[in-house]
Amino acid sequence: MPQSQKPRKKSPVAQTDTPAGGISPKLWFYGFIALMIIGGGILFLQAKPETKTTHLDVFAPELQGIEVKGGKLYAANCAACHGPNAAGSEKGPPFVHKIYARDHHVDASFYNAVKRGVQAHHWPYGNMPAVEGVSDDDVTAIIAYVRKVQVANGMK
């Protein structure tokens, strides 16, 4: 058989699944995955906490027992930022908000916030510093007050 009539061997490039002059499906797939990861990262980095400040009209309930003490302690230690009756202010968020409901911020989170402070993660107010001079018993009373105000304003 003459040399010119022998079947030619396919080159390695021709043996792939690549369409003529195109990109292989595998490369398209990996490129798509990379774009999804990069896009998700960009969206994550652009996500912001709630950007508006919130101040609510809050009903002040009749207090009893430890709630009375908690109301006084709240007024002395918390109201400057979290507003009267836990309604929020330009300095801090309201406690009468779903974020502070019992099923989202359990009572232990209040103790931790007072002792350690809190990094801003839900609101645009900035970090909350630890509150000096407030004992665990004081926090217990403040929590009783805040929970009473929450319930009086429709929170469970």
Image (tube, rainbow, N blue to C red):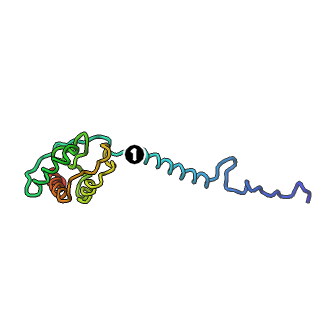
Horizontal side of residue 56 vs 62, given as left or right: right
Q: Position of residue 150 (x, y in %)?
A: 17, 52
Q: Position of residue 125 (x, y in %)?
A: 30, 43
Question: Which residue lies at the image location 67% right of the left edge and 51% below the top edge?
Answer: 19
Question: Which residue lies at the image location 24% right of the left edge and 51% below the top edge?
Answer: 132
Horizontal side of residue 97 vs 65, given as left or right: right
Asked if residue 26 is positioned above or below residue 46 in the image, the reply reads: below
The residue that disc 1 covers is 47
Query: What's under tag 1, amino acid-wise?
Result: Ala
Horizontal side of residue 8 vs 143, given as left or right: right
Front residue of 89 and 156:
89
Camera sees residue 104: no
For the C terminus, the image quarter is bottom left
Crowd around label 1: few <14 · some 14–19 · many ≥20 (10 Å): few
Horizontal side of residue 17 vs 118, given as left or right: right
Camera sees residue 62: yes
Which type of secondary structure does the marked residue at label 1 adopt? loop
Front residue of 8 and 129:
129
For the N terminus, the image quarter is bottom right
Question: Which residue lies at the image location 64% right of the left edge and 52% below the top edge?
Answer: 24
Q: Position of residue 153 (x, y in %)?
A: 15, 50
State the residue lying farthest toward the right. Answer: 2
